[in-house]
Image (cartoon, rainbow, N blue to C red):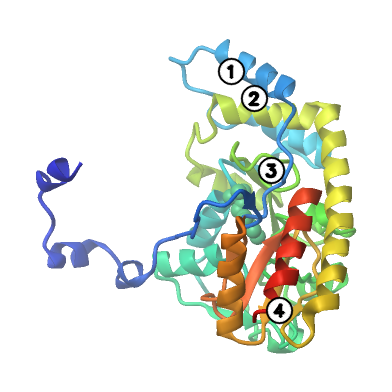
Amino acid sequence: VSQIQNNIAEPQSNLVDAFLLPSLQQARAYSIDTPPAQIKLDQNESPFDWPIEIKKRVLDRVARRNWQRYPSPFTWELNELLAKQLDVSPENIFTANGSNVILSILIATLTKKLEGKVVVARPSFAHYESTCRYEGISYEPWNLSEDFQYDISTLPELTPGSLVIFASPNNPVGNVLSLSTLDDLLTRHPQCLFVADEAYFEFVSEDYLQLLKRHANLIIVRTFSKTLGAAGVRIGYAVAAKGWFQHLHKLRLPYLINFFGLEAAKEILQNPELEALRCKAVELILTQRQRMVAELQEIANENFRIVPPHANFFLMQWKDAVSSEKAYRSLISDNILVRDVSKGPGLANCFRVTVGLPEENEAFVNSMRKIIKKV
Ligand SMILES: Cc1ncc(COP(=O)(O)O)c(C=O)c1O
């Protein structure tokens, strides 16, 4: 590999500077610490894989396609299935190979002709701030309160033409913005556009879809990666008024979703067995989460606090950096990986724990019982 690299001429820095924004050059690339660990509670994935017979059926359909041909350019069939499920029209749907792709397209496009501000929730999904930096977009943070809640009083003043990006339930914190608060914001700021990332909506009782009937200034983004147990399949979608997507569709590259993604997505939307598994998974994760949090609260003392969670993960904030680092490392030595988010803005001494299988959660709590005696 090094020999091949040596054969490629490197550009002078002034050539790079002539083409790439300083904010992109200075930004850090996405990285994830993945030391080997048997118990993986670090990526908010579903702990449940699909039944092998269903996987085989999907693969069989993929095998029977003509691989020398392009797939459907705009996945209308998938949009129709999704539209039916959500009781909207196919023109209200925008699909891509992962919701992070959709978020990137939305952020890059909706800020080109900016008349107001870009406001990004903080701490929230790091992809929003990273994308702004990669694209050279100035933005203002919407800081959560001391106790990690959305607080309207800390929302920057929204001048007409502002774009607001946030998640609910919010990763990595686990807090939510209530339906009524969003309803109120959308009413009060009809000239602003809100991008609501609902990657974890299946874990809460109220989702935002109904708001689209009354508010054209809302774009909802969702994913198949979490409750649907399909992070490896890479499917995300957005729902909003046609008025947005008739133009944004031009920016969606054709053939974005390959044969495998299309067939797996169709299976998810059409197979009642997968839907039943999804419901069971959500129920089990919520029961498990409640139990884990209760057990951890018992041993917390003044060492850490847990932000009340609303999805398949929870945030633990430790009393100081030394104990959070020590706990994180001790968990790894017990073969358990959680997500160290402590370098993110507003997340000092924090790590995030995904709810896994019952036996994995038990191992985590047992490991914490040991660790708490040492910090
Ligand atoms: C809030 C939020 N939005 C979007 C995503 C990205 O999901 P996808 O797998 O669809 O790209 C994640 C993944 O962790 C997330 O937590």
Q: Amino acid at mark 3?
A: Phe
Is the residue at mark 4 in contact range of ligand 1, meaning its CB lies under 8 Å from it? no
Q: Amino acid at mark 1?
A: Val
Residue 341 - label:
none
Residue 263 - label:
2
Mark 3 and mark 1 in contact (Cβ < 8 Å)? no
Mark 1 and mark 2 in contact (Cβ < 8 Å)? yes
Q: Amino acid at mark 2?
A: Glu
Tell which of 57 and 21 is nearer to you: 57
Q: Position of residue 95 (x, y in %)?
A: 62, 41
Residue at position x 57%, y 42% in the image: 96
Residue 224 - label:
3
Label 1 Cα neighbours within 10 Å, binned few <14 / some 14-19 / many ≥20: some
Q: Which circle, 4 or 1, is nearer the viewer?
A: 4
Q: Position of residue 27 (x, y in %)?
A: 38, 69
Label 3 Cα neighbours within 10 Å, binned few <14 / some 14-19 / many ≥20: many
| Residue tagged 1 | 62
Mark 3 and mark 2 in contact (Cβ < 8 Å)? no
Indicate which disc, 4 or 1, sits on the residue closer to the N terminus. Answer: 1
| Residue tagged 4 | 373
